[in-house]
């Protein structure tokens, strides 16, 4: 498969100019990462580990201090290609209220397309398609502020997919949502990935969400500590806890049972496989 | 005795306008002194509107609220004193920090209560220790701290008033797993140490299951139930239908039951699940 997002020896620092002399905080320290077209990658790490900073490097919001970030082969430090990059990679943030710009659902969804100079008839088509994709078509004429958190977040996602990006970066999109909102957003993300081949990078603090990805990358103090299939990552219970992270409850259960001397698989990360393993044990 | 009691509490936003919305509908409940309550409900279910009545930020459209036996709004002159009994911590409370130092920020509430300098000093030090804030941080600007530390300062500011009831709206949201655990454990310790009533609003069923004695469920403005944790999570289907959920571990045990392996009691935390299974296997715990 082709590489789509690529970081090579990537360094990034924030500089606080308000201090004299300016204070520099190194956030990313030589990150190497290669995300293939069509992958669904979850990024985990404690607050301040550099996950969001890394995601912003792939949308050319952050430009590397040292090393390179590439999007579909385009060097993100090439200012002339900024629009090409932003059209290929869309970003969804944590708080839906901060990313809604219009008062009506379909107008919000059309915002980027208008800026891109897409012809009106095509805007209509793309907005309708995008809203149908996220299941918000029936709400196209509704006021955005009256929607629930999960609905607003899906409108934000629709605004991104209307641009037809090849990749969507989502920075804790479910952090402020109720359980139903979280289910709606996760379902939408998985559908975009599996059915439309959109590359997904999901930053999350919910281990159950990360367990649904193809690949999990764990960042600690600006460096990649672990990178592999969810089963490979979540079996390292103690390592994850030392990194300030956690594992899904089902994985924790099997880990604790094993510690107590029960013969049970240690690579269980899903509910159904956990129920089956317990059934075999207890039947 | 009930520290919080409501009788047919109803609140209508924009009453008499075309945008009229009944956010809290005829809610009657009693919260006892010293309880740790989890509050759950879908977005827009009325959780926040309900808790804002508990310290008089909102005035009921109809019905009554009693705090510590005293009817709110009966005597407006008493309102201020009653408010000191119920501390409300909003979502992302760190956005409300404003003072030059953490010390001054925590002191703001107690100062308003008219306490003496020395009493305020004692409370600040005590509270800082309770929330796990090192004393050297007290003289720092809250804006120099990390997100998790800022949140501790903000919560300490309310705790320092020593309210009888502490209500927190999503105190762990936006924190990483370790930060979540630290904040929630800190609240549990505070609850144990002060024997005060604590209410936590949360969207995480796993967190609520671990820390609450009873769970209050709001659904479309109405009180769906206020009951023991295990009784609430036994209603998995109803909770799912109202946009909520049950902890992952509870779903696994529900699936096991479908397969034919059932247990007498419902399981909603991992340690309890481990214990239950080990007992069934005849292993000592």
Image (spheres, rainbow, N blue to C red):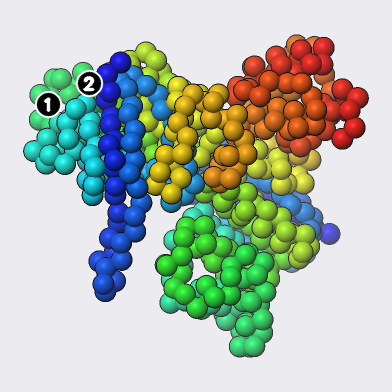
Task: Provide the residue designation for mark 2.
Answer: A126
Please give the name of the residue rendered at 49% of the width and 24% of the height, measured from the top-left corner.
A229
Where is residue A264 drawn, in percent x and y? 73, 21
Q: Which quarter of the figure has residue A192? A: top left
Q: Point out the image quarter for the N terminus of chain B.
A: bottom right
Where is residue A24 drawn, in percent x and y? 30, 61
- Report the front residue among B140 and A110: B140
B199 to the left or right of A173: right
Please give the name of the residue rendered at 28% of the width and 60% of the height, measured from the top-left corner.
A15
Q: Is residue B106 visible?
A: yes
Q: Are the residues flagged by discs 1 and 2 in contact, CB closer than 8 Å?
A: yes
- Report the front residue among B268 and A233: A233
Q: Which quarter of the figure has residue B89? A: bottom right
Q: Is residue A146 above or below residue B180?
A: above
Q: Point out the image quarter for the C terminus of chain B.
A: top right
Where is residue B56 drawn, in percent x and y? 60, 63
Q: Is residue A261 above or below residue B93?
A: above
Q: Which quarter of the figure has residue A101? A: top left
Around disc 1, counting alpha carbons within 10 Å, would you say few (fewer than 14), some (14 to 19), or many (20 or more)?
Answer: some
- Report the front residue among B219 and A18: A18
Q: Which mark is residue A118?
A: 1
- Report the front residue among B7 and A141: A141
Real-space Cα distance between discs 1 and 2?
A: 10 Å
Please give the name of the residue rendered at 33% of the width and 27% of the height, measured from the top-left corner.
A35
**Secondary structure found at label 2:** helix
Chain under label 2?
Answer: A
Around disc 2, counting alpha carbons within 10 Å, would you say few (fewer than 14), some (14 to 19), or many (20 or more)?
Answer: many
| Sooner in the amino-acid sequence: mark 1 or mark 2 | 1
Q: Is residue B10 visible?
A: no
């Amino acid at each position: 498969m082709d590489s789509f997002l690529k970081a090579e020896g990537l360094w990034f620092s924030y500089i606080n100019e308000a201090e004299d002399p300016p204070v520099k905080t190194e956030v990313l320290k030589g990150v190497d990462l290669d995300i293939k077209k069509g992958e669904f990658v979850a990024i985990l790490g404690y607050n301040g580990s550099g996950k969001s900073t890394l995601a912003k490097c792939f949308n050319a919001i952050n430009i590397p201090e040292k090393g390179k970030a590439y999007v579909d082969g385009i060097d993100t430090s090439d200012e002339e290609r900024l629009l090409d990059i932003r059209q290929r990679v869309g970003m969804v943030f944590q708080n839906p209220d901060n990313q809604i710009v219009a008062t009506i659902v379909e107008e919000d969804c059309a915002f980027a397309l208008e800026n891109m100079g897409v012809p009106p008839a095509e805007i209509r088509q793309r907005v309708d398609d995008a809203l149908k994709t996220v299941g918000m078509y029936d709400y196209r004429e509704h006021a955005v502020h009256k929607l629930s958190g999960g609905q607003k977040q899906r409108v934000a996602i629709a605004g991104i997919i209307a641009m037809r990006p090849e990749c969507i970066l989502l920075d804790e999109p479910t952090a402020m949502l109720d359980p139903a909102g979280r289910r709606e957003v996760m379902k939408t993300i998985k559908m975009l990935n599996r059915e439309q081949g959109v590359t997904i990078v999901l930053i999350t603090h919910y281990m159950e969400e990360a367990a649904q990805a193809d690949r999990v990358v764990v960042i600690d103090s600006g460096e990649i500590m672990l990178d592999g299939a969810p089963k490979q990552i979540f079996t390292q219970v103690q390592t994850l806890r030392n990194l300030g992270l956690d594992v899904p409850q089902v994985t924790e259960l099997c880990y604790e049972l094993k510690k107590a001397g029960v013969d049970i698989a240690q690579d269980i990360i899903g509910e159904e496989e956990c129920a089956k393993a317990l059934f075999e044990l207890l039947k | 005795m009930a520290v919080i009691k409501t009788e047919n509490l109803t609140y209508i936003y924009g009453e008499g306008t075309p945008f009229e919305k009944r956010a809290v509908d005829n809610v009657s409940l009693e919260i006892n002194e010293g309880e740790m309550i989890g509050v759950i409900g879908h977005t827009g279910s009325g959780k926040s509107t309900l808790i804002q009545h508990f310290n008089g930020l909102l005035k009921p459209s109809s019905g009554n609220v009693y705090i510590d036996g005293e009817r709110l709004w009966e005597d407006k002159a008493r309102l201020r004193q009653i408010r000191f009994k119920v501390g409300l911590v909003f979502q992302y409370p760190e956005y409300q920090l404003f003072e030059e130092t953490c010390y001054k920020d925590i002191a703001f509430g107690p100062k308003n209560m008219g306490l003496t300098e020395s009493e305020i000093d004692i409370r600040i030090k005590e509270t800082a220790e309770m929330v796990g804030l090192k004393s050297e941080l007290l003289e720092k600007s809250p804006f120099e701290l990390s997100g998790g530390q800022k949140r501790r300062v903000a919560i300490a500011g309310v705790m320092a008033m020593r309210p009888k009831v502490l209500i927190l709206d999503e105190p762990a949201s936006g924190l990483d797993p370790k930060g979540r655990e630290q904040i929630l454990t800190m609240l549990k310790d505070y609850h144990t140490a002060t024997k005060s009533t604590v209410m936590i609003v949360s969207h995480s069923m796993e967190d609520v299951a671990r820390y609450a004695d009873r769970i209050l469920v709001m659904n479309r403005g109405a009180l769906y139930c206020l009951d023991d944790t295990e009784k609430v999570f036994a209603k998995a289907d109803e909770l799912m239908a109202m946009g909520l959920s049950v902890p992952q571990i509870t779903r696994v045990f529900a699936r096991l039951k479908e397969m034919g392996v059932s247990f007498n009691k419902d399981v909603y935390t991992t340690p309890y699940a481990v214990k239950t299974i080990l007992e069934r296997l005849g292993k000592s715990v």
